Amino acid sequence: MTPNETVHRHAPGEPIIEAVGLGRDFVLSEGPFLRRTRRTVSAVGDVTFTVRAGEIVGYLGPNGAGKSSTMKMLTGILTPTSGTVRVAGMEPARRRTRLAAEIGVVFGQRTTLWWDLPLRDSLSLTRHLYRVPKREHAERLAELTELLELGPFLDTPVRQLSLGQRMRGDLTAALLHAPRLLVLDEPTIGLDVVSKSTIREFLLRSNAERGTTILITTHDLGDVERLCDRVMVIDHGRLAFEGDLPGLRATVPIPRVLVVDLATPAPMIEVPGARAVRVEGPRQWLELSDNPARVIAEVARDHEVVDLTLREPDIEAVVSSLYRGTMPVERAGSA
Amino acid sequence: MADTRHHVEVPDGERSGRVRHAATTLLRPFVDYRRLAWLWVRAFAQYRLSLILMSLAVMVSVLIQVGAVVILFGHAGTLAGFTVMEGLLVFGLAASAFGTADMFAGSVERLGNHIRSGTLDIMLIRPVSPLVQVAADEFSPRRLGKVVPALAVLGVALAGVDVEWSAAEVALLALMMLSGTLICAAIWVITGCLQFFIAGAREAANSLTYGGQALTEYPIAIYGQEIVRAVTYVVPLAFISWQPALLVLDRTDPLGMPEQLRYMGPAIAVLLCACAALTWRFGLRHYRSTGS
């Protein structure tokens, strides 16, 4: 698998997730005993979206925005307080067990694997719990072993695996029953570049070859750029944006930043097309409003430059400026 | 929903297929339990020395309790009209019921940990009853350390008491032991469910589970009428060892409670298990509507 391999993508099909006015309130009890007051807070306000079969959709938002609550409602772990949601044609909270057989879930921060046993044992337990026929399981395991390169550590106890290996194991466990929908909650958190890329390529391939629909929450721009056809940004329990990535960038134009390391500390650089925003000794941060090449040339003319880095606005910055600006819900045409 | 009900003539082959299907569905929780428990046993087998030492420690603690019973009866001669052997019978019934229930369902007391650490969420995304998963969690052979000595004491006591054994009598005893175990397991689940609602309810729950065990290891008539009434009609601990012992020994109730009570064990067990199932469902629904 090479990163540049072009994969044939299917056109999006039938809706597999349909959320209409989905909301979730929590009642908090506060204060000392007997004087306790109850307060209702809304974790997810009024969220409406559709994910179609074959799509890869990113679900973004800052911590505490309502991502996890939404994920829990989609998987039936949490019952919504308002609105409706249907996943694979079922109401998750009522048909949780049935739904479990149709979807695969990975929580990046938790594992479903048995710590003290070889990875292989946890995977074969999955076969029994999900009632997968033996032959089907063997074929699927062989396929996943090859794609995720599990071979070298299938017989290693999970506690001895690296985080990247463990995550590949968890992904395998979530996919062995061939689910139609894969729900991933920060699957690349804490992984190194190589592991991230293995997982991303694998996800793209599962999506292209098997048509597996993927809903992914992440804080990793790379995940979003490499994987997602479409992103939804949730903030304060409401959808702040829904559309494709260029659409998201266009919503909130955030300047790129040029980080310049000078040979000696200098006063704030003033050049056309850029604005110094921060100075720390010989290092300066310039916000670009013009072509970086021209700015670099200007800077190099006046100063001795030791090093340069150009920083793309990361999705976090876009997302955070999106909710600071309290934008109205906007739907860029994509779906 | 509607399309699953076909009003069509069902051929015999298909009907037996359905029966088999119903049987598999019914047995599923037990099959799943066995799979999960076996995996835990193998995980614990990785630490063999620790496993052996823990089992021994548990065994020693049971033997100390047995010693306490023997010494107590040795001094008093009889308690509530019970001889040493009869006292050991009560102890054996209680300890084996609690030990067996602890082995299969004791892990439910760690429900709070699963809620706090989020492992309950992991269980909820599997197509297996979360109660089965919680109960099978960390299933360890060391729990046999409780059951084996308890059964040994029970064996000695049964051989030692003055009873004429018939097949019916043995079957009745087995039924009562099963009921006692189910009552213990149900109490375990019900008290465990408190942790759905109250963080740190485990300690309070333990006063009922472990406290209940300590209570039932002695002929409860020694505690006086109020306690006996409470553990008969409120928390039915009396049906774990006291009433079965009266039945086996064919003894009249020293406190004059109705004779029929000693046959009620199985009914109480079924009732309590139904309560436990409802409590679990209620608790889980509460969890799914509060999240973590």
Image (cartoon, grey):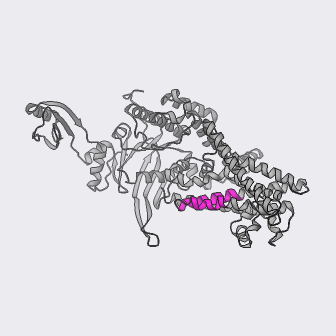
Report the span colored magenta: B183-211
Picture quadrant of residue A82: bottom left
Q: How many marks?
A: 0
Give left or right: position of A259 versus B190.
Answer: left
Give left or right: position of B229 versus B117.
Answer: right
Q: Nearer the viewer, residue A293 or A119?
A: A119
> Which image quarter is the N terminus of chain B in?
bottom right
Q: Is residue B103 magenta?
A: no
Q: Establish if B204 lies above or below A35.
A: above
Give left or right: position of B212 versus A61.
Answer: right
Picture quadrant of residue B73: bottom right
Give left or right: position of B11 versus A328.
Answer: right
Q: Establish if B216 lies above or below B6.
A: below
Q: Residue A169, position in %: x, y?
A: 51, 35
Q: Nearer the viewer, residue A252 or B196?
A: B196
| Residue projecting furthest to the front | B75
Q: Is residue B207 magenta?
A: yes
At horizontal 55% and vertical 59% (from top left) the residue drawn is: B195
Q: Residue B125, position in %: x, y?
A: 54, 48
Characterize the magenta stretch by its predominant secondary structure.
helix
Query: Is residue B276 at least partly visible in the picture?
Result: no
Picture quadrant of residue B209: bottom right
Q: Residue B24, position in %: x, y?
A: 70, 46
Q: Residue B274, position in %: x, y?
A: 68, 61
At horizontal 53% and vertical 52% (from top left) the residue drawn is: B113
Q: Nearer the viewer, residue B156 or A200?
A: B156
At horizontal 62% and vertical 32% (from top left) the residue drawn is: A135
Query: Is residue B182 at least partly visible in the picture?
Result: yes
